[in-house]
Every structure is written in C-alpha cells, then in structure tokens.
Image (cartoon, rainbow, N blue to C red):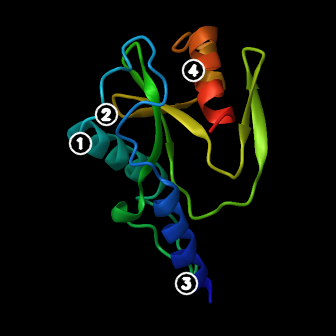
Amino acid sequence: MRYLLLIFCLVLCFCYCDGGVSPVNKSEDSSLKLDAELRNRIIQDYFNQYYFNQVIEPNDAVVQLKDVQICKYYGTFGGYVVIMFNSAVRQAIGEETVAGVTINYVDSRRILVWTDGSFYRLQESYEKKILTEQNIRLIANAQNNR
C-alpha cells in the first residue's frame, strides 16, 4: 500500500511539474532558459545532498535520481538559480515571510536557491544578500499567483 501511495504521489508530481525549463519571472538575467546540462547538475547536487546517504527503514521507498525533478524555475538572479523540486510528500500547507513578503505554499515543497553545488533557503539567501527584496517580491508573486 505504501508503494502504491508513493507511485501515485510521484505521478502527481510529474503531472504538476512544468518541466522547469522557462523562468517564471523575466527578471535580471533570468531571461535565459535553464539548459539541460545545468538542470541535470542541479538535480544531481540535490540528490547527493538530500537523498544519496539516506537512512532506509524496512519497507520505506527509496528515492532514486530519476525520481527527482525540478518543478519550477523562478529565474536566475546574479548567478543564483531559484527553483522548486518535486516531492513525494505533500502534506504541509504553509507560508514563509522573507523581507516582509509572504510566500504561500500548497504543500511541503519549498523554494530553494542553488549555486555551484550549494542550496540555500530563501531567508538565508536574503540574509546573505544573495537575493534582494525585489528578487523576493518577484519570486513571491510568481509563487502566490500560480
């Protein structure tokens, strides 16, 4: 039963994903498309960081590299790629506030910022001055008005 639920969730994820190739926002340097090579590198980095050494309990489903997809590409800001990955777990509706801007989520997936093998949450990206308040507003607008 657990495997059937996982398969169902993954199918929904793939249906929900827009392919992640075109940016949601036309901002700064995000008019460029996320090319296949960069996309594959980001997916590999994400898999290595979050799933490669995962602890498996008996009867748990194993996430494989082919299961990881970029669902949304919000743009590239100063060389930092802003994306959202799919997730087999979609249970936690929530929000986060960054730079006084509220970003709504319909499930447990969160927006991440990637550069050169490292991932950052939006708040951390803002605090480290990777993203500006204007960048956050563009990303929030795209997320909140899907």
Classify mark 1: helix, strand or loop.
helix
Q: Residue at x 33, y 28 (%)?
A: 116
Amino acid type indicated by mark 1: Ala
Classify mark 3: helix, strand or loop.
helix
Label 4 vs label 2: CA separation? 20 Å
Q: Residues within 10 Å of mark 2 (few under 14, many from 20)?
A: some
Camera-side residue of 53 and 109 = 109
Q: Residue at x 66, y 34 (%)?
A: 145
Classify mark 4: helix, strand or loop.
helix
Viewer-side label of 4, 2: 2
Q: Are marks 4 and 2 in contact (CB under 8 Å)?
A: no
Label 2 vs label 3: CA separation? 32 Å
Viewer-side label of 4, 1: 1
- Determine whether, in the image, residue 100 is placed left or right of residue 142: right
In this rendering, the answer to whether 96 lies above or below 49 is above
Is residue 59 in view from this perspective?
A: no
Furthest residue toward left: 37
Q: Are marks 4 and 1 in contact (CB under 8 Å)?
A: no
Label 3 vs label 4: CA separation? 36 Å
Furthest residue toward front: 145
Of callouts 4 and 1, which one flags the residue occurring earlier in the amino acid sequence? 1
For label 1, the residue is 36
